[in-house]
Amino acid sequence: MSDQRDLGIGQLITTSRKRDAIHVAIIPVTAGELMEPGAKVTMDRAGRAVLAGDCNMGIGYVDPQLQAPVEPGDAFWLFLHHGTIRTLRHEWTSDVFPVPDSVSASDITIITAPPAERAASEEWLREFAKDNFNPNRETAESYYATLLTGDCPAVHTETTARELNDGELGEELRKHIENVSGKRMQIWRGMFTCWC
């Protein structure tokens, strides 16, 4: 069995490969809403699995082998995305799920920023929203609200999208969203686009 990083899981295959096998981290969770097999999932503050927004990769996906949708309150296997766990030996750890047993609200990583840091992050995000909202589709306030859901609205310029996707600006945005929303957020390359 190969290391998933060596195989390039989550990327197109660009070199000759042979069949292999990988581990996939799974955790039992409870559905917070109706979801189809294979749907992208994130966790809400109550510890329930809910659909990730269009621009949010989420933390994993509903068991793709299920033959029917998952109803609210149903327990199911959440398949975690490659790279979202820190260890793997059939018992794993993750920033999203610090306790490797069943998930409850207390198991979800909630970020509690000091009040001054939270206020500074809120100010930063509101300024970011003013600079990037599309006046033909939304207001700065609705753009700000979208940011806090962990969904990524399009930004004002190609340069801003590139800076968000390639490094420090994306990390800064993630930090401010986490400080204000209290939830972990993932930023990945190619997540942001320009509405221009």
Image (spheres, rainbow, N blue to C red):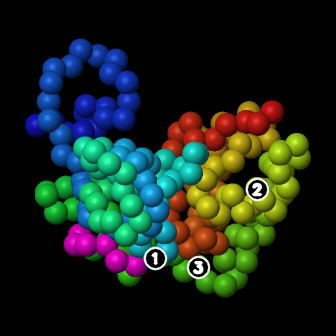
**In this rendering, position of residue 18 left or right of residue 185:** left
> Marks 3 and 2, how far apart in space?
22 Å
Could you tell which of marks 3 and 1 lies nearer the N-terminus?
A: 1
Secondary structure category for the residue under label 3:
loop
Quadrant placement of the C terminus: top right
Residue name at image x 23 percent, y 48 percent = 24
Of the two numbered discs 1 and 2 in the rendering, the one whose residue sits closer to the viewer: 1
Q: Which residues are magenta?
A: 100-105
Residue 144 found in image quarter? bottom right
| Residue under pointer 1 | 46
Tell me the quarter of the picture where residue 119 sits: bottom right
Q: Which residue is mark 3?
A: 113
Point out residue 185 in the picture as x, y percentages from the top left corner. Answer: 52, 59
Indicate the amino acid at tag 1.
Answer: Ala
Q: Residues within 10 Å of mark 1 (few under 14, many from 20)?
A: few
Report the residue at 53% width, 39% height from top: 189
**Toward the viewer: 185 or 66?**
66
Crowding near the residue tagged with mark 3, few <14, some 14–19, many ≥20 C-alpha atoms within 10 Å? some
Measured as percent of width and height from the top left, residue 60 is found at 38, 51
- Residue at left offset 34%, top offset 18%: 14
Magenta span dominant secondary structure: loop
